[in-house]
Structures are given as C-alpha cells and as structure tokens.
Amino acid sequence: MYLIENPVLQRELLVNLRMTRAFVLLFLYQALLGVVVFLAWPDEEQLNLSGTSGEGQRLGDLFFVGQYILASLMAPSFAAGTITGEKERRTYEMLLASPLRPSAIVFGKMVASLAHLAVLIVASLPIVMLCLPLGGLSPLELLAAYLGLVASVVTFGSIGVACSSYFNRTAAALVVSYLLILPLAMLGALFWTALSNEGQLRLMLSVTVVPGLALAISTALFAVTSARLLHPPDVGSEGKDVVDLDQEAEQAVGLVIQRDQFPDKLFAPGKRETLLHDGSNPVYDKEIRSEIFSQGTLMLRLVIQISMLLAIPLMAACLYIWPQHAAWYISYVVIFNMLCGPVFSAGSVTSERERQTLDLLLTTTITPWQILWGKLAAGLRVSSVLTIFLLWPVLLACVMVASYWSNLTSVLAYLAVVLLTCLTTAMLALFCSVVFRKTSISLMTTYFVIVVMFCAPMAMIFFSDEFLAGREVADYVAWFGVTSPFCTAFAIPLQVRPLTQSAAVPVVSVLGGWTYFGIYVCFTLAFNTLLLIAMIWLFKMRWRVAR
C-alpha cells in the first residue's frame, strides 16, 4: 500500500518522469556539472596523483556546494505543488474520499516529488568521481557528502509537502517553502565550507548528526501532514477549504487588515460601493481591491513573520554592529523580494485564462496599456510594501549609527537597488504571465530567469576567482555582474572603518563602484522598458486573435 501497490506513487512517477522537462532538466544538469569540472580542471601537463594535492578537495567542495544549492532550489519546485496541485485540478476532494490511507497518500506524494532529484543526484556521481584522482578527497568523504545531500533533500521535500497541505495555491506554498528552506540551505553550505580543513569532524557530522536531524524533521512533518489529511478542515465545493473570514480575522496573529481604517485603506481598500469616476482604470481598481487577499492571509502572515524573524539577527549584525557589511542585509532584502515579488504578478494574465475571462477582457474598450499597468501596479504594490517592511531598519540605522551620516548617498543607492529589484521581479513575472497559459509554468519560469540574472553572475565571478585567476577570460566575467543587484550592492562604495570594498566584483577596481552602479541602473531600466514594449506588442498583435 505504501510502496509497491501505492496508486498515488505510481501515477506521480509516471507523470513526472515521462515529461519532456524531466529529460531536458537531466541534460542541462549534467551539462552544467560537466562544464564546471572541465573549466576547473588544472592546466598542468603533469598532475600529482599521489593523493597529497588539494586540487581534488577544492573542486570536490565546489562541486558538492553547488549541487547542494541547486538541489535546495529545485526541491520546493517539485514538492510544493504535490497537494495544492490536486486542489487546483479540483481532484483533492476525490483523493480524500478514496480508500487510501492519508499516510500512504503523503508517502506517495513525497517519494514521487523527490524521485526526479534522486535521479539527478545519482547521475552526477560519474562526474564527481573525476575529482578523486586529483587528491585531497577520499571516497569516504564523497559518500558522506552524498549522504548529507540526500538527507537534506529529503528534509526539504518534507517541508515542501507540508506547506502544500496548508495552502490552496502552489504559488503560496512555494514561497513559504523557500522562506523556510533557504536559511537551512545556507547553514548547510556554511557548515560544509567552514569545516573544509576538518575532514574527520565533517565526515562524522555528515554521517551521524545530519541524517539524524533530517530523519527527525521529516518524520515529524510526515506525521503532521498525514494527520491534516486524516482530519482535514471543512472542505466545500471543488475541494476548497471553507473559511470563516470573521473567525479568521479574530484568530489572526501578525496581520489584521481593517479595510475601513487608515492607513490600511490605502494599502488594501475595501469593496467599492460607488461608481467608478470617468477615466478610471477598472482593471487597476479591481486588482487593487482583491490582490492582497488572492494568495490568502495565511501566506501573508507567514511571509511577514518569517522574514522579520530572520531579519532581526542580520539587521543587528550587518547594520549596527558591523556597518561595513550593510550590503549583506540589502542582499537579504533582495532575496526576499526575489521570492515574493513574482507571486503577485505571475498569475495576473494566466489567471484570466484559467477563469476563461481573457477573451472577455480583450474585447472591451480597455487598451492594452491600461490592462498592463493596472495588473503591474496592483502586483507591484503588494510586493513592494512587503519588501519595504524590511527597509525601515536601514533608515533607523542612518539615524542611530554615525558611520552612515557621511554615506547617505550610498544608502540611497542601496534603496535604489531594492526598488529596481522590485520593479524587475514584478515586470518579469507579468511578462511570463502574458506569454504562458498556466500560472504554475509562469511562476517557475520567472524564478528561473531571476536566478539566472541575479545569482548566476555571482557564481561565475566566484568560480573565475577560484579556478580561472590569471586567465584573460576572468577579466570579462565580472561584467556579467551588472545584471545582478547582489554584485551591485557590494560594489557601492561605503566609507566605513575598517574600510572595505567588495572583492566579488573585480571590475570595480577598474571602473569604480559608482560607475558599476550606474551601468546596473541603465541596464535594469532598459530591460524593463523592453519587457513592457514586448508585452504591449503581444497584446496588440497576438493575444487579440489568440482564439
């Protein structure tokens, strides 16, 4: 019932592993790992294969940390939609009414969601085995690393499935999963790199402590999720939870919005009781009064509470105790917007298709420009306000810490980086929503493009510093950082003693930090302008005759 004759597991495995994207992802994953090993391979004509060289350890650590981060990013994408997908397909009610045990359902969903990641991890073994002859990396360390990787992936998958049981939409479950998983993934990566010189200790912890913690967390989450399916909340038509809004408002902790009071009515105005004024945008008016609750108040409460909880230690350390590391806190704010920004815009147009109202919207007298800016402004309003909640410590630090008084221009540049990030994530999500037909595909594509634009340049710069130092190509790699708000934040000059300057952007020493910031601003504005022009063109030339 759990493994051999589990219909949920069999169905999910057949659907997931036979999809075209499964083979494409496997090819891209293997190609990426192969290119990394090829570029990092030593240039010496004669290699020391006696086992005393440290090249194998450096390459193995890079290989494992990179694979660990990729797995932590992919695990929620496979697991967070396991149960919410049933709700969105309107099959959740039938699944609950089946004779299957809730634990068998959860087990089948969890194993199927992690099966694809297991295939990717196993397929990477032949490539990582190439690092062994370089020395410094023993087979036992390699097995311990993979044991810790598998344990971490199982934990991340359990978190994703648990979040999926609490939400009605995949987007909400995905965001909360990432907010919970990313801190754990960062701790795991820091643990592995910090103990790089303590091979025996790292080996022991990877074999004993990490699997034990993973087993405890996964078992607890499995039990909680199974109990929720055994005793689900009131389920109404189409498998949707029946929610009493008044009771939810009374029990809500951390987010209680009173639509008729100031300043809440500016952020989330109530239902319109009067007619629209002449010349008003009905799309914007409709979205601004519903978008704040379209993802559910539970998602908003968790996002605000988790983000503020994680921000407290970072705020104290990076803004007040060691102000020279202010760019790290700005990077945390950017990561938060990367997760939350696309959620409120990725379904702006795809939701119209899913509700079969897009044709009706396109046949009205509303222009494509009005539709687009109404959708964009509504989604950008929510994501920007949630992000700005994390910026008030920066403004408070400018008042309390004297080091910032002579760096107000740099602080304004930090704020500009965050605001441009908000615009980029919302605009890119809206563009994907215009291009694709399903919200889930639109959201995942948005996340993929954002990771490539924002995070890939940092990985390329780090890789070039470690393995391509002295080569001509390393001088050009840093230019890719102008697409990343992270590289730009570290490039902004901050005259704080002890004086620091970002070592992650080598081209800064040639161009200067402000020139780097200016290039980033110009690129971001140009990129968003092109996206807007492309969306207007698509509306005018394609979508009006799409059906």
Image (cartoon, helix red, strand yellow):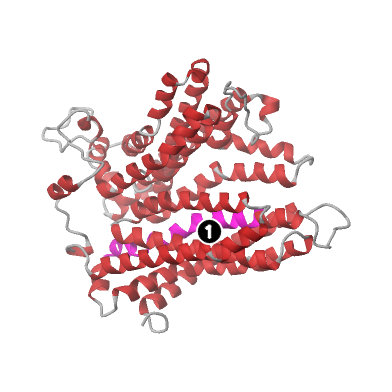
Name the residue that disc number 1 marks.
Answer: 71
Does 428 appear above or below 417? below
Given residues 203 and 73, the one toward you in this image is 203
Q: Quadrant of the N terminus?
A: bottom left
Q: Quadrant of the C terminus?
A: bottom left
**Among the 4 quarters of the image, the one containing residue 54:** bottom right
> 131 left or right of 446?
right
Given residues 384 and 368, the one toward you in this image is 384
Q: How many marks?
A: 1
- Local packing at callout 1 (Cα closer than 10 Å; few below 14, some 14-19, many 20+) is many
- Residue 223: x %, y % from top left: 33, 68
- The single residue placed furthest to the left in the displayed view is 273
> 68 left or right of 172?
right
- Residue 413: x %, y % from top left: 50, 24
> 76 left or right of 259?
right
The stretch of residues the image draws in magenta is 62-91
- Residue 245: x %, y % from top left: 15, 49
Residue shown at 63% from the left, 67% from the top: 143
- Residue 231: x %, y % from top left: 21, 68
Q: Say whether residue 156 is magenta.
A: no
Q: Secondary structure at mark 1?
A: helix
Q: Say whether residue 89 is magenta.
A: yes
**Among the 4 quarters of the image, the one containing residue 281:** top left
